[in-house]
Image (spheres, rainbow, N blue to C red):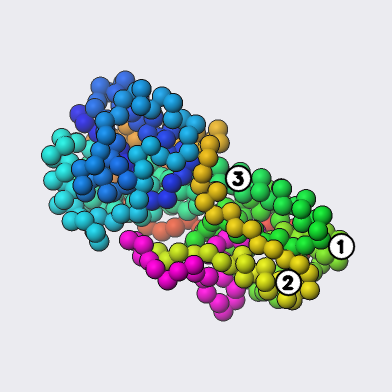
Amino acid sequence: MRVGVLTGGGDCPGLNAVIRAVTLKGIGERGWDVVGFRNGWHGPLTGSLRPLSPDDVEPILTRGGTILGSSRTNPYTEGGGTERILEVLAAEHVDALIAIGGEDTLGVAERLCREGVNVVGVPKTIDNDLGATDYTFGFDTAVHIATEAIDRLHTTAESHHRALVVEVMGRHAGWIALHSGMAGGASVILVPERPFSIEQVSGWVQSRFEREYAPIVVVSEGAQPDGGAEVLQTGEKDAFGHVRLGGVGQWLADELARRTGKESRAVVLGHTQRGGTPTAYDRVLATRFGLHAVDAVADGDFGTMTALRGTDIVRVPLAEATAELKTVPAERYAEAEVFFG
């Protein structure tokens, strides 16, 4: 059997751990040939691939990024769709694909499977917004990076008696902001799920200043003020129809300075959250996902995704995993609100 593996969408700490697990178990236990398709769905569309051996993957467990490269290629808008992918897989004698990705990559995988491609999915996103799994790998690393940044910003904010606004990733789901904000002792946390009142945020910030405490505001890039809209870096859309967000942190810092009369600065963590060494938790979770994906392929259980339920790895239908985003529920946000202001 010859099995292909690909990584699509935004890069994420832990991708290489999945590739390593799939390769070592696929070759060592199953006796398969394993190949890596380059740059997400671009690989199966163009036939761009590389053989994978134990020597290729042994050193990559601790590395961030992905040795296969990634992209936001959408086969249905820029490349011939299912028919072309089936042609490439047949020409390369690839019997099945393991697709590692988030909502867009796995949405393509689910459609391809319905149309005759043997696919198993592995959930990846730092945003932790994929349904049907308790956690995705990459999230723990992103939260750890954001929390460390917040810890460092507390001291400089206190030294200069200023407010600092920390913009973190989170297009439609505020999990990174919620977890890093709570872990870092933020004065306010703003998420896409809850439009915020700039007057209320200003009041919370002002109350912190009155107690001689420098406030830290953590805001998801997709958070919006009441009656407002997302702040965009550009109006351009990617292959999956997503606009590029960014700028709410600076807008918020400017508004807070104007309303409170206190110096306010914005810090955008951006792609720092995606890079570098994955945490131990993410390495283990990604490895387990990869091992169980190999079992799913061996069982012919295509159209499924490996998922974490409690401490167990289970299989769920790709259709269930991509049906809707997992967003921050009101009760989880209410826990954080106790510490605002």
Report which quarter residue 57 is drawn in: top left
Quarter of the image with the N terminus in it: top left
Callout 1 touching callout 3 (CB < 8 Å): no
Residue 21 locus on image (x, y percent): 39, 29
* Label 1 – label 3 distance at C-alpha: 28 Å
- Residues packed near mark 1 inside 10 Å, few (<14), some (14 to 19) or many (20 plus): few
Residue highlighted by disc 3? 145
Q: Residue at position x 48%, y 34% from top? A: 63
* Label 2 – label 1 distance at C-alpha: 17 Å
In the rendered structure, which segment of residues is drawn in magenta? 218-241
In the image, which is nearer the foreground, mark 2 or mark 3? Answer: 2
Q: Is residue 315 magenta?
A: no
Q: Regarding mark 2 in the picture, which secondary structure is present there?
A: helix
* Label 2 – label 3 distance at C-alpha: 27 Å
Residue highlighted by disc 1? 211
- Left of 28 or right of it: where is 275? right
Q: Residue at position x 13%, y 40% from top? A: 90
Disc number for residue 257: 2
Q: Regarding mark 3 in the picture, which secondary structure is present there?
A: helix
Q: Is residue 239 magenta?
A: yes
Q: Regarding mark 1 in the picture, which secondary structure is present there?
A: loop
Q: Earlier in the sequence, mark 1 or mark 3?
A: 3
